[in-house]
Image (spheres, rainbow, N blue to C red):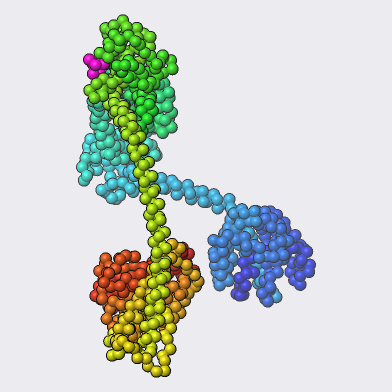
Amino acid sequence: MAMITLNIMPIAYISKGLRVDETVKSPHKADFSPEKITLLETTAANLPGIIFQILQRQDGSIFIPYISSGCKYLYELEPEAIQADYQVLYKLIHPQDIQAFVESITVCRTTGKPWYWEGRIITPSRKLKWIQVTSQPVLQEAGNLLWNGLVMDITEQKQAQEKLQASEARYQAILDAIPDLMFRISRDGEYLDLKSEGANVTLSREEIVGKHLEELLPSDVVAISQVAIAKTLDSGTLQTCEYKLPTPLGIRDYEARLVVSGQDEVLAIVRDITDRKQGEVALQNLAQKFAKAFSCSPDSITISTLQEGRFIEVNDSFVELSGYERDEAIGKTAFELNLWVHDCNRLNLVQELQTTGVARNLEVEFRQKSGEIITAILSAEVIDLNGISCILAVHHDITERKQVEAQLRLCAQRDRLLAETLVRIRSSLNLEEILQTTVTEVRQFLQADRVFIGLNNANLGIRTLAESVDPKYPSVSGWSTNDEAYLQELRNLLKDNFVRVVEDMTQITISPKVKAHCEKFQTKASLAIPIMLNDELFGALIANQCSGSRHWQPIEIDLLQQMSEQVAIAIHQSQIYQKLAELNTNLEHQVEERTAQLQQKMQEVENLHRVKDVVLHTVAHDLRTSVMGNLMVLKNLLNQGVGSGEQGAGGREQGENSSPLPPAPRPSASFQSPIPISRSIIERMIQGNDRQLTMINSLLEINSCEKQGIEIKHEPVQLSTLLGGTFAQLEPMLTQNQATLKNLVPADLPLVMGDGTKLQKVLVNLITHSLHNNPPGLNFTLSATVEAGMIRTQIQDDGVVMSKLECDRLFDLHVRDPQDCCSTSIGLKMYLCRKVIKAHGGNIGVISNRKRGLTFWFTLPLATSSATIHP
């Protein structure tokens, strides 16, 4: 057959076809007559699949003359749908089988052999089917290629194959997983076959098959094996035998199970049971150990049925704990022995065991044979004894521990009560409230029927200060008697007995009067502790039990003894308070007198302050006027040429402001003073008046800011602009003192909030301070940085240093050296600097450098900062 190059896609869809009526319209209708189509339909109806014809023309186009109606079942598609778009079949191929499908077409195209393919499809309803396609291409006369093919549904066949393969794999896996040796042995003892995979066999298959038992096994094992083989073949039933064999690992135990596997042959399954045998021995040893632990355990151990709770076994500790002998308990239930104090505990135990199979550390109460109640910790597990669910329970007696815990709780309550009473005594002076709270809490602690505090008074007799009583019983509050003999007897009972403990009033000898008193107030038991004050009997703290007799515990007696001491302290404190109150009354009168005197003195001081303000303003203004007049006269004299000799070498002293008065105009002709005056003296007089004027102005400004505060005009200020104006103002002073100033402040610093005029004064005052306290030639360095929403400005010089104390006090208002009036003037200015910076919301300070010089610093808030401004 000639080879024709086929298009892969048309060949891939060889199961597609045309409707029968389309053959009439086809140009190849002569090749596909109605008789042939009828034959195809008849054939397709008798086949469980699809018959198809595909015509591939020479130009590569595809023509499908026929496809049977079986595509409805197989593909779930109508023939018309396939004819309309044959590519729908390609979309049904399982994604994992597409590669194999394409490869099968390639093989057919390259070899020219018939096309064959098996694969899976997924129908529109999502069903998975296996199909088998076969086709034989036939070359037509016109050069076209006609494919006749058959599509078969092989789903059931594939599923059956998969099940068979899975079953075989499963059985093979089971066989491979069995670690036992398997032998086929004849009746006469010949090894016919074996399976040894996974077993520990020292001989190879060739060394075993064909040999007899006596050739490989010891004689005793051979005899056992031959008997078992014969018995298996004769009875046709499973036979089991055990034997030992020497191996490189030592003597090993083996078990052989024999079954009939053919005519006069058996299948022997041999298993190494050495570990099992050793486990059985270990289990026996463990059982012996358990029996010893069961009998020797210091805790009670019982085994009882889960459903009824009937005892099967108990140990000696149970006999000792419960009081029941072993023969009395076994066969009985815990309910029959009345062991459970609370029946619900047994129900809760069973529920927990049925849910989790184990119960741990359950605290329960049991009743002994004597009727005494004990407390135990119960732990239990469910065990199986001959198919019966049983409870293995361990009981640990904690009765003594519970008693100790209860005693500790009582001690803690006692200590708490004593501490609270002590706190009340220390924090309160209300004696009635202290005593009432004390008897209430003591009665609650003792669970007594009545607790009261009685007062022994020679004039008033015995009376009750505070009482707490159960409403069911009569109150002793308000009781009194005039019988002095009876009162003295009661006093003697407390005086002669430091602690009077009566557990049962009917068992002691008392006078008729005391007996009548006890009957009246239904007192059956009593505990009385005397309250001693200055070695005298002041009263008693008494607890009564009215419901019956009572055993008073040592801790209860100890509590009342300590409480009586605290009550004595409270009473003594109350007496002191009364005396103190009397003293306070006298003291209040004295305080009132002293207060009136103090108010009078304060009024006098206030008047003095007013006088001081008047004097300060009057004298300061007068001095200011006088100084300004002196300055004007001195400057006029200096300008008129008055004064002889050379000018003073120093000129004006450093750092002082010149007079605010303008100089007088110089006259055309020099003026001759009748008194010769040195020009330097006039200059120094001008300097002195300048300092006095500056000091007066500073004093007035300080007094004003102390009383009214500094008025700050807050507005955004550019620090570089502010410094420029300040440098212009300082230029003459720096030149006069031969000083230099290096400006390192960045020009792009953020704006600050402040009063530019007052900030300039701060800068001038700080630099003036350094100029005043250093020789000429000082060097300044200015810098500024942004820190935490503030701008920190620093002025560093290379002059003299100061001590830390001087740095700390530099901005304080204090008296300076009286010999240096200029220092006082500068000190006032530094104080004003701090007031100005504080008013801006910043801080100011000075640091003495390690080698030389000082560093002044101050901070100002940024214009955008949320810092609070303090006016």
Is 545 a magenta residue?
no
Residue 504 in the figure: left or right of residue 54:
left
The extreme top residue here reads 512
Q: Quadrant of residue 36?
A: bottom right
Q: Quadrant of the N terminus?
A: bottom right
Residue 216 in the figure: left or right of residue 347:
left
Q: Is residue 70 above or below residue 351?
A: below
Q: Percent position (x, y) of residue 759?
A: 43, 73
Residue 116 in the figure: left or right of residue 421:
right
Please report the residue visible at 40 percent of the width from the left and 78 percent of the height from the top: 629
Magenta residues? 493-499
Please report the residue visible at 66 percent of the width from the left and 63 percent of the height from the top: 88
Q: Please name whichever residue, 617 or 305, is drawn nearer the observer in this view of the structure.
A: 617
Please report the residue visible at 60 percent of the width from the left and 61 percent of the height from the top: 93
Q: Quadrant of residue 498?
A: top left
Q: Quadrant of residue 573?
A: top left
Residue 510 in sight from this viewpoint = yes
Please report the residue visible at 60 percent of the width from the left and 58 percent of the height from the top: 121
Q: Please name whichever residue, 548 or 644, is drawn nearer the observer in this view of the structure.
A: 644
Q: Please name whichever residue, 594 or 542, is drawn nearer the observer in this view of the structure.
A: 594
Q: Is residue 166 above or below residue 363?
A: below
Q: Please name whichever residue, 767 or 855, is drawn nearer the observer in this view of the structure.
A: 767
Q: Percent position (x, y) of residue 98?
A: 56, 64
Residue 842 in sight from this viewpoint = no
Q: Percent position (x, y) of residue 467?
A: 38, 20
Q: Percent position (x, y) of residue 84?
A: 72, 65
